[in-house]
């Protein structure tokens, strides 16, 4: 004899199943949404795994080995990292990268903010100049580097000819033979190439400032500088911090412009950290040591980005 649970009726064979309760339907709908979300995220997860996580693990594994281009890899533990700490060439490249970052970051930030304020003014042709300033962003960094390499060439470069006519250089000078002029040309090229993106990001931040706040400040007698100092800058700080993160990260990873325009010269004085990793890995073919330098550079970049993100989070409540 079949026993029944209290309060539960015996359904005859062949009868349709009992309808689901509200809690069961909600649980089933939640499970379907979770599966749908997982299915939609699966392609991105595959791409991140294949092109980021797997290479990251392999790079760290290689950094623990003496890994020549030909022959068997030999496990050396942390020897590559201890060697990198005392590698004067890498430390010199790292110092130059930090110098380049310190110089170019305020240039991009100040000029980008100036252009954003300029094209935001309700004047005729502002949209046209906004497009003009943004156009170089669409050009590849390698293409822009080759263009400016031609512009600055002695005897044939239009920029060199302009400087010669202005009396700033002699006809026999080579702008890429001096570290100061070579770095100045690279900074000019990167500024021309990137400042349009900085302008666009800062312009979006400016447009998010409520007009009511600005009008209230004007009614209270605030002038142009007071509006900028006490209204625009405080409300723009989250956008400024975001632009700063992008600018610093891109500068620390600089490679193409120096590889194409200066070739690391003169006398290896314009070699960046990424450029040194390239030389160690693909010129000297010391892949294990190059992987260790890459990991160290990634740690430095992650630390700098983390500090900047903390500052960015701190500005959200101002």
Image (tube, rainbow, N blue to C red):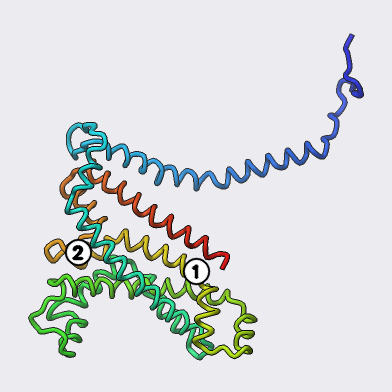
Front in this rendered view, residue 167 or 299: 299
Q: Quadrant of residue 98?
A: bottom left
Determine which residue is flagged by label 2: 270
Determine which residue is flagged by label 1: 239
Badge 1 marks a residue whose secondary structure is helix
Residues at discs 2 and 1 in contact (Cβ within 8 Å)? no
Picture residue at 22% right of the left edge, 58% below the top: 93
Q: Is residue 250 left or right of residue 312?
A: left
Between the residue at mark 2 and the residue at mark 1, the CA separation in whole angstroms equals 31 Å
Total count of labels? 2
Front in this rendered view, residue 131 or 281: 281
Picture residue at 21% right of the left edge, 77% below the top: 151
In this view, the residue farthest toward the left is: 172
Front in this rendered view, residue 305 or 246: 305
Q: Is residue 33 left or right of residue 289?
A: right
Picture residue at 46% right of the left edge, 66% below the top: 241
Q: Is residue 56 left or right of residue 185?
A: right
User: Residue 211 location in percent, x, y?
Assistant: 62, 81
Q: Is residue 66 above or below residue 43?
A: above
Within 10 Å of disc 2 (Cα), the crowding (few <14, some 14-19, many 20+) is many
Q: Quadrant of residue 77?
A: top left
Q: Quadrant of the C terminus?
A: bottom right
Q: Quadrant of the N terminus?
A: top right
Badge 2 marks a residue whose secondary structure is loop
Q: Is residue 29 left or right of residue 307?
A: right
Within 10 Å of disc 1 (Cα), the crowding (few <14, some 14-19, many 20+) is many
Along the polypeptide, which appears first: circle 2 or circle 1?
1
Label annotation for residue 226: none
User: Residue 201 location in percent, x, y?
Assistant: 47, 71
In this view, the residue farthest toward the top is: 1
User: Residue 21 location in percent, x, y?
Assistant: 83, 36
User: Residue 96 location in percent, x, y?
Assistant: 23, 62
């Amino acid at each position: 004899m079949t026993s029944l649970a209290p309060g539960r009726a015996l359904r005859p064979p062949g009868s349709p199943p009992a309808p689901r309760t509200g809690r069961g339907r909600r649980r089933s709908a939640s499970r379907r949404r979770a599966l749908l979300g997982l299915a939609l995220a699966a392609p991105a997860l595959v791409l991140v795994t294949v092109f980021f996580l797997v290479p990251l693990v392999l790079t760290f594994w290689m950094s623990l080995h003496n890994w020549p281009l030909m022959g068997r890899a030999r496990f050396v533990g942390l020897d590559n990292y201890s060697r990198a700490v005392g590698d004067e060439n890498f430390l010199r490249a790292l110092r130059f990268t930090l110098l380049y970052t310190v110089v170019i970051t305020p240039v991009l930030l100040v000029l980008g903010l100036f252009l954003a304020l300029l094209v935001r003014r309700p004047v005729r042709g502002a949209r046209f100049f906004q497009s003009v300033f943004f156009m170089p962003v669409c050009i590849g960094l390698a293409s822009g580097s080759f263009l400016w390499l031609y512009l600055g060439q002695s005897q044939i470069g239009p920029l060199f000819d302009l400087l010669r006519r202005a009396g700033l250089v002699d006809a026999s000078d080579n702008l890429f033979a001096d570290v100061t002029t070579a770095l100045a040309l690279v900074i000019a090229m990167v500024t021309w190439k990137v400042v349009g993106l900085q302008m666009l990001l800062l312009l979006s931040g400016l447009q998010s400032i409520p007009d009511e706040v600005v009008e209230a400040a004007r009614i209270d007698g605030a002038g142009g500088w007071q509006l900028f100092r006490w209204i625009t800058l405080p409300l723009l700080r989250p956008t400024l911090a975001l632009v700063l993160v992008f600018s610093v990260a891109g500068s620390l990873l600089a490679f193409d412009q120096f590889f194409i325009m200066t070739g690391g010269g003169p006398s290896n004085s314009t070699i960046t950290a990424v450029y040194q990793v390239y030389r160690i890995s693909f010129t000297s073919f010391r892949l294990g040591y190059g992987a260790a330098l890459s990991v160290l550079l990634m740690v430095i970049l992650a630390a700098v980005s983390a500090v900047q993100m903390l500052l960015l989070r701190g500005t959200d409540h101002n």
